[in-house]
Amino acid sequence: MISFSAKSLSASIRASTVLEGVSFDAEAGELIGIIGPNGAGKSTLLRAMAGLLPHRGSAEWNGRVISQMTHSERSRLIAYMPQERTVHWAIPCRDVVLLGRLPHHSRFAGPSTADRMAAEDAMRQMDVAEFSDRPFDTLSGGEQARVLVARMLAQDTPSFLADEPINGLDPAHQIGFMRTFQAFARSGRLVFVSLHDLTLAGRWCDRLLLLDQGKLKSNTPPDQLFTSGLIEHVYGIETTTITLAERLTIVPCSDKRRPNRTTAGEPTEKTLNDRDLI
Amino acid sequence: MIPVDRRFYVLLASLAVATALLFVLSLGLGQVWIDPRLLIASWGSPDTAEAIILAEIRLPRALLALFIGAILGLSGAVLQGFLRNPLAEPGLLGISATASLGAVLAIYGGLTAFHPYALPLAALTGVLLAVLLLQTLVGRSGDILTIILAGVALSSLAAALTSLALNLSTNPFAALEIVFWMLGSLADRSMVHVGLALPFIIVGGGLLFMTGRALDALSLGADVAQSLGVSITLTRLLAIFGTAIGVGAATAVSGAIGFVGLIVSHLLRPLVGQKPSRLLPASALGGAVFLLAADILVRIIMPERDLKLGVVTAVLGAPFFLWLLLSLRRRSA
């Protein structure tokens, strides 16, 4: 069973601190959403967790510090899916998914029959088997995202880190992906996804990490976060909560920063402060 | 549809056959046709004039075309995969320009008169200094854009210094020698040149071939490649030093021969199913085919004018480069 622990994780990009003292623990079986406004440090957190970024503090997988693991050890523990869905060259989807098997075949050998079967299995699971021979760049955004998740699945690691995997997808795909990620978690994996859609985050995630300006503001199940008033403060929005499938989730309603949405003559700052007191 | 795997091996086999045929043709062709079989018949003790021509003039020329073509094709494929840019080729890193500068300085300084090795060794020294400078410029970050820009800067500097040497050259013969050398040619090379270049080309080629797997992973971006267990730093060192050693040695004996890596890699990429690792052996063979064919062409078109090989590849290559730019722009539009 995989476990993860961040201990005062901090990271800087070009001398400005983008992640500051983030600490939390996570266990296999959880689907954890990472939320926060643009520039809050969601991608940086995921990259630091995957050991792709120099950082201070420690990111520990199964009690082992990531920066002390070899590349190949990491590749058997963590599969990472970046925000950009780019594949250079017009590589057929089968080969894209097969790349997920790189950590499993020996250095100079090509993929084995077992590797090919694992890749085909992953493609069937993500319902992209029909695209096997099609070049990746000819697919739609949703199809591309499914192929890339299949690639992650083929890597067959106990944990997945996905950076905004549902960005730019239609609602059916978004819901489909959240359902898939939840299923991955239920099958014993530890899954982290960064998200912008708060409603979906609340509906599907077991726990939400709220980041604001590089700091971890909250680490609770969604219903607790949504009734704390923190969302409104951090995002600068007004919200309403609803219950979906017996779970409390949140719907953003209006943004508080625009003066024309507030009472005439009243400074915006004031509204924010008022809201903070609640 | 034929499976991609089988198509790939058929392609490699056809390229290998083409290489072998062109190699034999290159032995036979010249001012007079000599039956290439004579080379084997008289191996070790060439007694006739024809046998001596084959063993000491035609053979080194054909061998150099084969190996230099292969290393140029291979390094083009590796650099395109590593930089994820279809326009990359060894010339881009400043390898050819700095090798030329080293060679030109050797001619300019009159070192070539002392020892036949002086010129290639000076060229290799130039490349080595350039690569160390490139590594320093790029630093630990390994940013792709920095690598390309540093390569362009190095090329320009080397070209400027080469022009300066020409400019200041008081000896018109030295100037002419410099110009002719820079045009790139395989004519009048001996087995000494083969012996000098071959070990470097083999070592450089070996380093370049080691990048295949990493290049495949890199097609998903540097972060994903790293999460798949690939070391980006190691891959960069292999790509840059492999190119420097292999192409540096090639340029040291042949002069600058451009565009081979660019054209060959681009033409073969669709035929190998786009996968960067598969492009490596195909591009090496394709480079050999291309250069053997071009070197035969310069002997056929104007046998009496000593047409330079580098000129032919550039005349074919530059328009191709423009066409490539246009078609890339059309695709992204």
Image (cartoon, coloured by chain):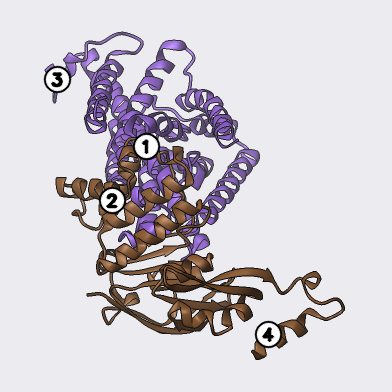
Chain colours: A brown, B purple
Position of residue A267 measured from the top left corner of the image (x, y, whole percent): 82, 81
* Residue drawn at 25 percent across, 65 percent down: A76
Q: Which residue bears the numbered disc 4? A: A275
Residue neighbourhood size for the residue with mark 1, other residues' Cα within 10 Å, grouped as few (<14), some (14–19), many (≥20):
many
Q: Judging from the image, what secondary structure is the residue with disc 2 in?
A: helix
Are there few (<14), some (14-19), or many (20+) residues within 10 Å of tag 4? some
The residue sitting at 21% across, 57% down in the picture is A104
Residue B72 in the figure: left or right of residue A153 = right
Comes first in the chain, label 4 or label 2? 2
Residue that numbered label 1 is attached to: B274
Chain bearing tag 4 is A
Quadrant the C terminus of chain B occupies: top right
The residue beneath circle 2 is A125
Q: Neighbour class for label 2 at 10 Å: few (<14), some, many (≥20)?
A: some
Compare residues B40 and B242 and report the one nearer the observer.
Answer: B242
Which SS class for mark 4?
helix
Q: CA distance from mark 4 to mark 2?
A: 46 Å
Q: Which residue is mark 3?
A: B40
Position of residue B15 measured from the top left corner of the image (x, y, whole percent): 28, 25
Amino acid type at mark 1: Gln
| Vertical placement of residue B267 versus A36, above or below | above
